[in-house]
Image (cartoon, rainbow, N blue to C red):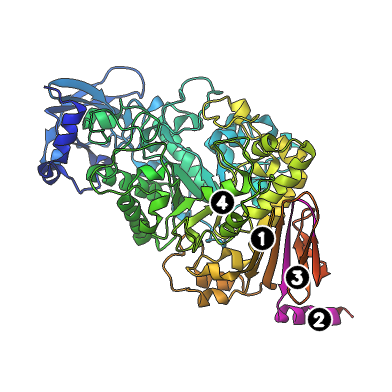
Amino acid sequence: MIKSAAEWKQYYADPEFHEKYTYEGHNLGVQCSDNGTVFRLWSPCAESVFLRLYKDGSCGNYYAYIRMDKGDKGIWKYCAAQDLHGIYYDYEITIDGETRETADPWAKACGVNGKRSMVVDLSKTNPKDWDMDKAPDKPAENIIYELHVKEFSWDKSGGFPESYRGKYKAFSCEDTTLYGDGIHKTGCAYLKDLGITHIQLMPCYDYGSVDEAGEEAEFNWGYDPVNYNVPEGSYATDAHHGEVRIREMKEMIQSLHKQGFRVVMDVVYNHTYSLDSWFQKTAPWYFYRVNEDGSASNGSACGNDTAGERLMCANYILDSVLYWAEEYHIDGFRFDLMGLLDVKLMNRIRRELDLRYGKGEKILYGEPWAASRTAMEGDAKGALKENLQFLDSGIGIFCDNTRNAVKGSVFNVDKAGFVNGARGLEEDMLKSVRAWQKTEELDVSTPAQIITYASAHDNQTLWDKIADTVPDRNRWLEINKMAAAVYMTCQGNLFLLSGEEFARTKNGLDNTYNESIELNRLDWERAWEYEELVNYYRGLIALRKQLPGLCDKSTEAWKRIGNMWFEPLAVGFTVDNTPDRISDYGADNTADLLSDSAAGIVSDYKDTAWDILSIVYNSREENLKVKLPDGEWQILADKESSFRWEKPLEISGEALVEPREVLILGKKTEGEKEKSRRHENDIR
């Protein structure tokens, strides 16, 4: 008799089940080589499993129907003497008298739309020189740029070849320009000029909300997992042959590495596209949380929550992350709704990545929240913001405290933040500056745990938020500049939504996950229409990379922030910017995992020109006069230019801060002054 969800829940909770069926091997799925092909499937409650083989990934009947053998720990196995690379397959499983058809949850390749799995010899999918591919050296500071594969190159203005638009292949184009004019950079060349260090790709595993055989204009963000270990086919030039998407995704990563970018993958292990999944068909209700009344837990607001606290589900997620890191050379992972996963699992992932690749080599961060309550079992703790103290210090979280303080609530479009005129947020701005270390709100041990940002794919773009909260259109540009200058002078790791720097708009909509590609695409014309804003971001990023006082990720980095003061709609502070002070503030701590080690930063910044910074945020409608600490100060950035540091003007005594301006000042080191004097004497 088929069990109810509540009965399955009770069955899986029995310690006897765990002892009998927990499989600790890491070879589920298919292993294929010249020596033969081995199929392994975990389906502990199945009465029988038949393997079906096909020549095609979407049509035609199976040509072989093979009974599999059941072994220990719920593993069904079949060994073929021949190399079956390129053959498609699925399973026919009988559980409690009900027979169902399913693809392989552990598949590494699939046919169109993922309904049939594919046998793949992964060595045959590697692009030329793949074994030589490696990430560029870790930067002194991470500048993470969130991109969607299709949005990146869909618009004609990007100048990409027609057949590459919206595809993985577009990232291999290194010198694209606006409509191919040969002058105005777009694509990766533009991002390199901007100063980006990490490209975070929105979901590019196989997801279910777009028909891979359908219209090219179909669009979705992709938070709908079907085959976790297979690249999405709609981004490939050929979705029908399973090896193509694998090779082209590898080519994309190889090209991005060559161009100087590290690659972060957005992963969604908290739910599946639907409950009618390969998980459910092979092990009913094991991979999902169930409420006490037998209903499916829905903390994801997508109809289901995966049960990452159950060991086989945890093993699956861990193995999947390690697979992407190993096979595809992925440099980091951004976890969607990380609060739905448990602390133990996230710490385990962090530990395993460090053991394999070196401490902090792969960055790890996520959303420390859930959409709603989830039925997490036992004493498991969700990887939520309130549980930050239990997370490994090498796991970062998106800091909505900073985001909301800067621009206002994302849930109330009319509610402003500090830069768009809201009072009472001054103390929150100062807490944001030091990445919320030593505050009541967050138990932050190091700025490495904080992702500092103003906008992401969710909710309104920064430009649209400003437009909805500031009636005077003439002020939007300077307020956008101010927002960027604010969060780029906060400690933590910097993150921005693609196009934020050229006033990206989605016509005010806050959730465009399934809207048209025409609305969601990057409009590269806008990058040059708003060239002034782009250059402002570019200057801020270049300046940030010269400021170890803001890039410090040690446990005592907060001590660098001093002389804090605030008045209504204005705050100010100083920053100890001396490189060798980093080691004084705990270079031997274990936290510095989202950026370079403290020692590395000291090395990178040994010639930093300013040993102290003085920074003022003025969101008032009138000028603000600020008394400066003693000495001669240089203007490094103001509301007009973020490149003042190239030829800085000197001031002392008092600074005039204009309305809606961030003023960044620096005081030169004695050593740098001496070098300048020698240089002037040489010229004379």
Q: Earlier in the sequence, mark 2 or mark 1?
A: 1
| Residue 669 within the segment the image draws in magenta | yes
| The residue stretch that appears in magenta | 657-682
Label 2 to label 4: alpha-carbon separation: 41 Å
State the residue at coordinates (72%, 51%): 619
Percent position of residue 240, x then y? 42, 26
Give the percent coordinates (x, y) of residue 405.
Answer: 59, 49
Is 470 on the left or on the right of 71, as rendered?
A: right
Residue assigned mark 3: 628
Q: Seen in the image, is 658 located left or right of residue 465?
A: right
Q: How far apart are the alpha carbons under marks 3 and 2?
A: 24 Å
For disc 2, the marked residue is 677
Q: Amino acid at mark 2?
A: Arg
Q: Amino acid at mark 4?
A: Thr
Q: Which mark is residue 402?
A: 4
Query: Disc 1 residue type?
Result: Phe
The residues bearing labels 1 and 3 have C-alpha atoms spaced at a distance of 14 Å
- Assign a secondary structure to mark 3: loop
Q: Quick check: 482 left or right of 36?
A: right
Give the CA distance from mark 3 to mark 4: 26 Å
Instruction: Answer with left or right where residue 151 lies relative to residue 349.
Output: right
Which of the two labelled residues, at mark 2 and mark 4, occupies the earlier sequence position? Answer: 4
Q: Secondary structure at mark 2?
A: helix
Rendered-image quadrant of the C terminus? bottom right
**What residue sits right under mark 1 in the picture?**
566
Residue density around tag 3, few if under 14, some if 14–19, many if 20 or more, within 10 Å: some
Considering only vertical position in the picture, is 219 above or below 199? above
Q: Nearer the viewer, residue 268 or 30?
A: 268
Of marks 2 and 4, the one in the foreground? 4
